[in-house]
Amino acid sequence: MIELPFALSEYKARLQAIRAEMARRNLDLLVVNDVANQHYITGYDGWSFYTPQVVLVPLADEEPVWIGRAMDAAGGLLTAWMKPENIVGFPEDHVQRADRHPMDWIAGWIARKGWDRGNIGIELEAYYYSPKAHARLTAGLPNATFHDADLLVNWIRSVKSAAEIDYLRKASRLAEAAVTAAYDVIAPGVRECDAIARIQAAQVAGSPDFAGDITALPPTILAGENASAPHVMWSDRRFGENETVALELAGVVRRYTAGLARTMQLGRMPAKVGDTGKAVLEGMEAVLAAIKPGITAEEVEAAWRQVIQRYGLKKESRIGYSIGVAYPPDWGEHTISLRPGDRTILKPGNVLHSILGMWMDGWGIEVSETILVTERGCETLTSFPRDIHVKA
Amino acid sequence: MIELPFALSEYKARLQAIRAEMARRNLDLLVVNDVANQHYITGYDGWSFYTPQVVLVPLADEEPVWIGRAMDAAGGLLTAWMKPENIVGFPEDHVQRADRHPMDWIAGWIARKGWDRGNIGIELEAYYYSPKAHARLTAGLPNATFHDADLLVNWIRSVKSAAEIDYLRKASRLAEAAVTAAYDVIAPGVRECDAIARIQAAQVAGSPDFAGDITALPPTILAGENASAPHVMWSDRRFGENETVALELAGVVRRYTAGLARTMQLGRMPAKVGDTGKAVLEGMEAVLAAIKPGITAEEVEAAWRQVIQRYGLKKESRIGYSIGVAYPPDWGEHTISLRPGDRTILKPGNVLHSILGMWMDGWGIEVSETILVTERGCETLTSFPRDIHVKA
């Protein structure tokens, strides 16, 4: 058994919160397809979600059930807290075949268990849960009524416990180490791939006291012609003289993710980069001054927008989102977004990754912080000089 | 514009093969949701698939269309070969909202284009295509008839061109470098995370001549109590004395993936490990002797099974699969599987990752090769000593 990241009492509290919401919605069973939610509920951890994998949470006071590929049930026994009979493997002869589907088998299991009646809540927009899987599951459970339960668990995740915040603090240390490594290695003539190798090593090796995990998004380095495109991957391109280099990095400890974006300037700082940088840094000050319990997500964005409008700038995309436990391909929790129209009222324990990315024509600037909403205001979990780092 | 991995003529040939199959199935439009297929068709490359992203291939002789998040259209202009008007961004105000969905907008775009009638083929089991996305797309296109087109493109991908094989050869060099790094760093007392950092650095930094890309599955190291669970991730656990360490690694060049699994023995080799290792190595010889054009996938597996049965061993799961261009979470192509019941006839240009993994009670052995089916037999693209590596 691998050491659980949290005390059993914390898993029980999570289940209690989930069941309270299930009861409110009159759900008898919750089918959890989102891998991060599965981990949040059970502790299960493994790179096994390339075949169908579900966690079942009955409203009744029973342990949840993990069902995945038979080969990976061994990993379930090592990582999840439930009793062994609640770790269930679908047979190997159901893996990636045209004539049968793991969801046929899973539907059969649910029916044999007697959980196939009443109202079933199910996450319909989880990564790795396909339309075909859903069609086979619902066909196999004709006596149930299905209800969309997207984000039910995610909203509960949006308020972090003290133990979760502790992991996020550790993750922030690794995010800072990643940016430090980037500042150190990136220079004119160095290949992007060599820089990434150094950055990932800092992320994964972690600290002497704890390991780093894989980041849900790979490290992004935007420089040269790629700088206008926020999610292009690295290559063997070499950094040029006088390039502006935007870095979107993270640190991850026990799947808890802290994001940290910073910008470097190789050689001389062009006036436009300096000016935009000044606006962005002032915008970040406005964001941090605004965040406190009781304010809405859109009010935080408005504080930012007011600043950059004064500089004649604008940004179409949101400036932040809830962050926490994460698996690829995304570290955002898909709940709170700092943007117009999001009237979510911020609460103590929310953790936001506010990323101020300005992708201009052929260059870009990114600055971010991972921010904890506290009782009275907020605190940046990430702690690293925010200025554009000039490396002459 | 980032240099395309292939000549334009190769993309045209791919489209031609896809359209021949579309015509055979009487499809007017193909909606491609699988990220690897999207890349195969268009060259588009970016970590943007955490919001909906499609590639549309009309039967008519027109360029395909990429549609994704507005922010990522910039990356489309840099990486895909189509003309700029065929790179389409859905508006930022559709990202992760409860009140609207990117697929509403994409359905509208398809209708405005006049592609909303007739028979639409669509991939219903792509990793990042959700039941909700599908419900919204089909609701927005009431005049079309939808047909499952899973694996249509994947089967075309299963026969590799000379240029693809060249990337797979380069990728094999990086897989070998990754195993070399693992053999070098892993020793009693070393933490798994520190070993992973070294392995990933070898994978990503690549060679002096080309970069390495992210692997679709992260490096797996199975040792100690984790050895029985094939997809558990690394931690800060330290390797012990006399541990058997199974490594499942890969090298990736321009998204083309070569897998390479090997096993190390720290300290003294226990007799059971040596005996099982001997059976597995003999099994691999049988696999390589069997693979040639005209043989079926299940016949290859039978050759392996015959060997290990003689040793009193058995393995439930398949012993290999088609491999090539890949994005997380899987590097398998979901077409050919080396297992009973798979009657696919192997052809020159098929590339298989044959992985012989025996996960026993508390220890495990893995040995694999990435194998090209040639005109007369086969060739291992990976080239690395196959014996269990004893590090005393």
Image: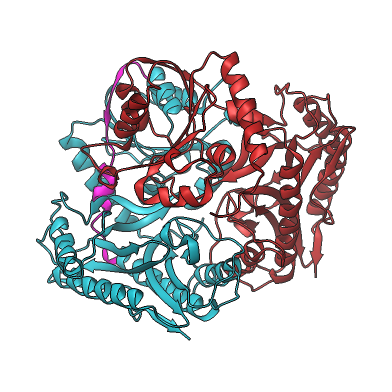
Chain colours: A cyan, B red
- Say which of B50 and A76 sits in front: B50
Q: How many dots with numbers?
A: 0
In-front residue for pair B215/A162 = B215
Is residue A43 at least partly visible in the picture?
Answer: no
Magenta range: A141-162
Q: Is residue A160 magenta?
A: yes
Q: Is residue B170 left or right of residue A324?
A: right
Q: How far from the left and from the top, in percent, is residue B83?
A: 49, 41
| Res. B265 image quadrant | bottom right
Q: Per the image, is B216 magenta?
A: no
Image position of B85 (left or right of A303): right
Left or right position of B28 against A24: right
Tell me: B136 left or right of B337.
left
**Residue B173 visible in image:** yes
Residue A390 image-quadrant placement: bottom left
Give residue A38's position: percent from left, percent from top.
39, 45
Looking at the image, the residue that sits furthest to the bottom is A392
Residue at the spot x=69%, y=68% of the render? B186
Residue B372 in picture, x, y percent from top left: 79, 40
Residue depicted at x 49% and y 62%: A225
* Looking at the image, residue A41 lies above or below residue A122: below
> Does residue B203 sit above or below B167 in this rendering?
below
The residue at the point 85 percent across, 38 percent down is: B378
Above or below, A348 against B5 in this view is below
Q: Position of residue B364 (x, y in %)?
A: 70, 51
